[in-house]
Image: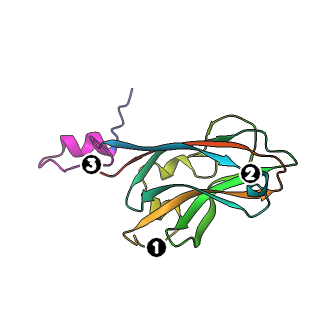
Amino acid sequence: MTTKNSDLIANLEALPQVANAASELGGRVRIAQGNVALAATDTNDDDIVMLAPVPTHATLVSVRVGSDALGGSCAYNVGFYTNAGVVVDEDALATAVADGAGVAELRYEVLDLNTTGQQVWELAGQSSDPSDVYYVAATFSAEGASAGDMAFIIEYVVD
């Protein structure tokens, strides 16, 4: 039988002890959540719904997004934009999510499990932290035709 320690345990047991990042052990989870009422004209291909700002140094714990059935062959990507509205990575988190599926966990829809603990700027494919906020956003990748609601729950750790 073997015992494999995570880095968190190895750091704790090291002599001298090594401090773990607060975002990985003992950090406080923050939440951004809400609903967005969408008009039929908000669900066209390439339309963007900015959901919430998240600090680029935060680590994402969970990203859940869902919508009503929005008609047509409606689908959306979930990714990051700067606070100036410039796309960083439109589908960093999820690609072609079908509408009307209820609220679904999307944190690992595109990203591998080995991205656990990475900061937002890393998940967005950047080479360094811009020390700012990115907007988590849904970008429609196929046409919708109906009004409806989009809900989101984003959990992240900053300290």
- Give the percent coordinates (x, y) of residue 20: 25, 49
Rounded to the nearest whole Å, what is the CA distance between mark 3 and mark 2? 41 Å
Q: Nearer the viewer, residue 143 or 10?
A: 143
Q: Residues within 10 Å of mark 3 (few under 14, many from 20)?
A: few
Is 102 contained in the magenta span? no
Query: Mark 2 or mark 3, which is nearer the start of the sequence?
Result: 3
Residue 50 lies, with reference to residue 20, above or below; the image says below
Magenta region's main secondary structure?
Answer: loop
Q: Residue furthest left?
A: 16
* Boundaries of the magenta span: 7-27
Q: Say which of marks 2 and 1 sits in front.
A: 2
Residue type beneath disc 1: Ser
Q: Is residue 24 left or right of residue 110?
A: left
Q: In which quadrant of the rendered view does residue 71 lie?
A: top right
Residue type beneath disc 2: Ala
Kindly identify which residue carries mark 1. 127
Kindly identify which residue carries mark 2. 39
The kind of secondary structure element at disc 3 is loop
Kindly identify which residue carries mark 3. 22
The kind of secondary structure element at disc 2 is loop
Residue type beneath disc 3: Ala
Residue 40 lies, with reference to residue 80, above or below; the image says above
Is 22 contained in the magenta span? yes
Task: Name the residue at 69% across, 55% down.
Answer: 77
Task: Name the residue at 46% across, 57% down.
Answer: 53
Q: In which quadrant of the rendered view does residue 30 lie?
A: top left
